[in-house]
Amino acid sequence: MVFFENAPAKITLSVDVLGKRVDGYHDVEMVMTTVDLADRVALTSLEVDYIDVSADNQYVPNDERNLAYKAALALKNKYHITRGVRIDIEKNIPVSAGLGGGSSDAAAVLRGLNKLWDLDIPLSELADLGASIGSDVPFCVYGSTALASGRGEIIEELSPPPVTWAILAKPNIGVSTRVIFNQLTLENLPHPNTKRILEAINQQDFYKLCDHVGNVLETVTTSLYPNVQRIKEKMVQAGSKGVLMSGSGPTVVGLVEHQHKAIRIYNGLRGFCDEVYVVRIIGYSTTC
């Protein structure tokens, strides 16, 4: 029996860093939502106690380094499962892009195995387990719109944002989240106004949201990769109302109200950037 689970990409509407923690992580405050660009994860239950993972992308490891592998192993260990699983991942989300592809794959494995093996574990418990795998995994388990705090593992679900379309533009570089955080200077950061972003979502006010989106990590990523800043400028010139980098980058997100405008911006960016996508924002849970 094969079970399929979608693993949607996530984008950040706000990224703030509040301080350094004693455990080496940073305290963050992030507003995140999901889009309809997604990996597809196929799970085949095995009678033998073995985890086999395979992804159709040369930059994704097919061994215990893969977050999907770690998710299956964590679930097996915690709940004493002696069966195995084959995990096949069809990659559509760019790798090392700030779009949470690996974390979403791991979350899809947790959700999918919960159903495939009839474990009946609540999503909240799966999210807690996901926190041991990666900071973005808890959000991806829920797969909706949320305010994430702590190191990213504390999730407060929100209403979907008042946005229907987004342009994603990724230059041909990969960014290490660890490197970006290690080079972040906490003094004099241009903090986004998270309160105003939450108000915009509650009020379904597209323009207010666009006025307040922001990402403190851009200060590091754009200094290391100036092309990220150039893409931001191109997006603004093309007519995107709210433009910011997603996560630690390098993907730049442009928020757009209407599909026809999103397609026009997409066509204008294709010759300038290696990977460009027009996506629809989901923003609500499709996991139930």
Image (spheres, rainbow, N blue to C red):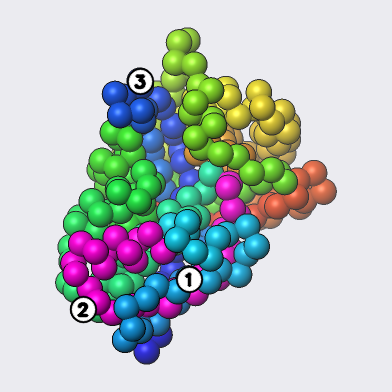
| Tag 1 secondary structure | strand
Residue 135: image tag: none
Considering the numbered disc 3 on the image, is that residue within a helix, a strand or a loop?
strand
The x, y position of residue 272, in whole percent, is 80, 44
Q: Nearer the viewer, mark 3 or mark 1?
A: 1
Q: In percent of the image, x 48 and y 28: which residue is there?
A: 181
In the displayed structure, 243 sits above or below 281; it is above
- Magenta extent: 69-97
Q: In the image as oriented, which residue stretches furthest toward the right?
A: 271
Mark 3 to mark 2 CA distance (whole Å): 41 Å
Instruction: Answer yes or no: is residue 103 visible.
Output: yes
In the picture, the disc for residue 19 is 3
Quadrant containing the N terminus in the rendered view: bottom left
**Residue 53 image label:** 1
The residue tagged 2 is 118
Image coords of residue 288 (percent x, y): 27, 68
Question: Who's the residue at 38% across and 35% down the image?
Answer: 30
Closer to the chain start, of discs 2 and 1, is: 1
Q: Amino acid at mark 1?
A: Val
Q: Residues within 10 Å of mark 2 (few under 14, many from 20)?
A: few
* Amino acid residing under circle 2: Asp
Left or right: residue 227 versus residue 242 is right
> Residue 64, position in %: x, y?
45, 61
Q: Is residue 42 left or right of residue 246?
A: left
At numbered mark 2, what does the secondary structure look like: helix, strand or loop?
loop
Q: Are marks 3 and 1 in contact (CB under 8 Å)?
A: no
Q: Earlier in the sequence, mark 3 or mark 1?
A: 3
What distance separates the C-alpha of mark 2 from that of mark 1?
21 Å
Nearest the viewer among 189 and 121 is: 121
Q: Are marks 3 and 2 in contact (CB under 8 Å)?
A: no
**18 relative to 94 in the view: left or right:** left
Q: Which residue is pictured at 38% across the width and 59% down the height?
A: 70
